[in-house]
Image (spheres, helix red, strand yellow):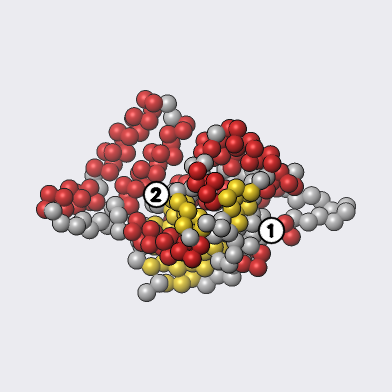
Amino acid sequence: MPHPHAYEHILFTLDNGLAHLSLNRPAQLNAFNSLMQDEVRAALEHVRGDPSVRVLLLTAEGRGFCAGQDLAERTVAPGEQVPDLGASIERFYNPLIRTLTELPLPVVCAVNGVAAGAGANIPLACDLVLASRSASFVQAFCKIGLIPDSGGTWMLPRLVGMARAKAMAMLGERLSAEQALGWGLIYKVVEDTALREEAVALARHLATQPTLGLGLIKQALNASPGNGFEAQLALERDLQRQAGRSEDYREGVNAFMAKRPAVFKGC
């Protein structure tokens, strides 16, 4: 049975190797306030420290995925000190993006409805992103005089090219799910009514796979933009050595030779 953890602004369950974290401030389009940031951080720390977790699924409740930062926490009355946005990024958004990219296991994200601001870039830090047909991605930062954060300025040029990245960041236009798919931002578009079911099915499939090896694949691919060719070859050698010592590799070979389904343990 799923094991629920009590939070106010997120839903978090663990079930047969699948950790499911769902943003749950639907009335605010799941915009981040301080409490939700703290709860997401706590849930991800649990994922990182629990060896039974083999895949993370990130979803959201209601009609939108995430509207980014809740600006109700950012309003400043005349004469008041302007909040330090850099401190907010350093405290929450940067660690969140690092955690999603560094987790040694697959991270699946299902985007329903609008994903704006940080909410448009958090999915890009995940490994397999599904979006509902009605979903959209908006780099809304420029509309309030800010720059894309949560890794946006790093990921967007690498995913869509500099010309499109600049247009997205400077114009803040809504990008449809189909456009996001065509531009290489996401993995798949599904019908709205099928999104959650398909995302859960994908995550459950991944939880049965050799997830140590999948984590090493993720590590190698994430390192490749910053590596030269020789450095990447050396990294492949080192990670393959590690993968070749795993129980899953031994099981995979034995199952293949015996013509039977493999039973992977993620180690």
Reading the image, the residue beneath label 2 is 104
Residue shown at the point (60%, 37%) measured from the top left:
165
Three-letter amino acid code of the residue under disc 1? Asp
Dot placed on the residue nearer the N-terminal end, 1 or 2: 1
Relative to 143, say whether 47 is above or below.
Answer: below
Which residue occupies the foreground of this view, 146 or 74? 146
The N terminus: image quadrant: bottom left
Tell me where residue 163 sits by quadrant.
top right
Residue shown at the point (54%, 46%) measured from the top left:
179
Tell me where residue 126 appears, x and y as whole percent: 48, 50
Q: How many angstroms separate mark 1 from mark 2 (CA)?
A: 30 Å
Tell me where residue 3 appears, x and y as whole percent: 42, 72
| 203 lies left or right of 173 | left
| 220 lies left or right of 8 | left
Residue 229 shows in the view: yes
Tell me where residue 146 sits by quadrant.
top right
Give SS at disc 1: loop
Residue shown at the point (84%, 53%) measured from the top left:
80
Tell me where residue 193 appears, x and y as whole percent: 49, 66
Give the residue furthest to the bottom. 1
Reading the image, the residue beneath label 1 is 70
Which residue occupies the foreground of this view, 132 or 31? 132
